[in-house]
Image: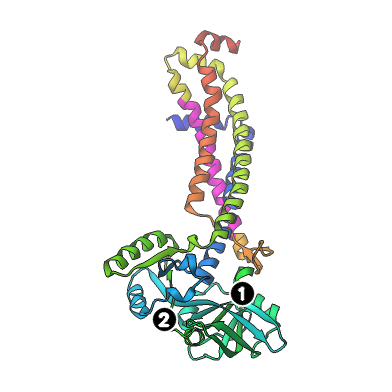
Amino acid sequence: MIFSLAFRNVFRNKRRSLLTMVGIVAGTASILIMGGYYEYNYWGLRESFIRSQYAHIQVAKKGYWAQKEQDPYAFVIPHFEELIALLESQNEVEAVSPHFNFFGVLHTREGISELVMIRGVDPDRENKLNTFFTRKVGKDLHVNDIEFAELGIQLAQRTNLSVNDEFSLSTVAADGSYNALPLKVKGMIGSYSADFDAKILRVPLKTAQILAGIEGVQEIAILLKDTEKTVFFRDKIIKLLAEKGWDLEVTSWDQHAGYYAQVVQFYGGYFRLILMVVMVVMFFSTLNTMIMSVFERIAEIGTLRSFGASRSLILFQFMAEGSVLGIGGTIIGIVFAFIGAAIIYVSGGIPMSPPPGLTTNVFVQIMITPSLIAMACFIGIGIPLLASCIPSIHVIRTEIIDQIRHGN
């Protein structure tokens, strides 16, 4: 009954109520569109780090991440096949790939030398993990391509190397001797990180072990089926390894991708500022409508109270009117936001130049998440409720006789 009366009261002045709802619709849609824009950027950046560099989970010997540049060969996992089999048996795992990382020097026939990060990989496993590589030129690396290598696109440009060009790769082996191999470029790979593309050189695991003069790997990268289960799976693997008696360190991608956290913090500030502006505009537009609605009906309020209506009932009536405006505007705003997101999706996304530190142009979509919808509903309904309370409380606190006289 109360909401039926609230609906009728709201549309006593249709033009004013519709203008107020337009403000709520615009505010709700803006929150979802802008929030969806940022969510898609966060998702794309996060998945690019996970699926081109780190994977979700990394398993290595304790101390490896702190000292891998000083002494990479001191943290080799010798019998890694058993560990890979254990990890692949877990239901949450999509792919497992061993990595053998160390630094070396690339020499070209033209006399160009460049310090590179050599990553020995199992190409078949690695290709399942690196689904966010934007391959530029050449072919995929295979297990038996021990005389070939893949170069980061920025590294290839800096050394003037193309597909099938020859170069030599040298490094200091585990026993302290100087080791070198002649290799050919099979392909050039590009991720979303300019720094990574400027130093990465991938070779088959066997080639890396020949160069280093040592068997084994230092790191096992684990790609999960669901990013949301990263923390759960990390804790699960820590317990599992402890039960097996393996003294290994388990880390997650966010512990290594500091740039991602900086981007989220930086752009999160922009979104909070936009959110604040939208909330202020929505609040004052609704407050203006509710003030006019309440003060036009002061005599009516006095009459209702003289017939026994309590102050709380009157307050609840005006809150119901505010909620009608909020619910209606929020629902329409959500519908408009989904229509806008669908149009952007069908058109191929919003073209954007590469963000700072990245190399690839992106086409941004709008990712409307359940948390964004919950936020939009809370703001779209909560602000009209708050705006309806302020003038209502002021009016119902006056005496009944003064409310009735106000009409005269």
Q: Residue 393 carries which label?
A: none
Q: Quadrant of the N terminus?
A: top left
Asked whether 34 or 225 is in front, the reply is 225
The percent position of residue 31, horizontal first and vertical second, equals 58, 47
Gap between marks 1 and 2, in whole Å?
23 Å
Residue reaching furthest to the front: 176
Q: Mark 2 points at which residue?
A: 216
Color scheme of the displayed model:
rainbow
* In-image side of 351 versus 103 (left or right): right
The percent position of residue 214, horizontal first and vertical second, equals 44, 84
Q: Mark 1 points at which residue?
A: 199
User: Could you tell me which residue is drawn at 69 percent across and 89 percent down?
Assistant: 109
The percent position of residue 313, horizontal first and vertical second, equals 43, 22
Q: What residue type is labelled 2?
A: Gly
Viewer-side label of 1, 2: 2
Asked whether 210 or 373 is in front, the reply is 210
In the depicted structure, whether residue 286 falls above or below residue 107: above
User: Could you tell me which residue is drawn at 62 percent across and 69 percent down?
Assistant: 195
Is residue 36 shown to the viewer in this render?
no
In the depicted structure, whether residue 281 falls above or below residue 246: above
Identify the element where label 2 is drawn. Answer: loop
Asked whether 269 or 205 is in front, the reply is 205
Identify the element where label 1 is drawn. Answer: loop
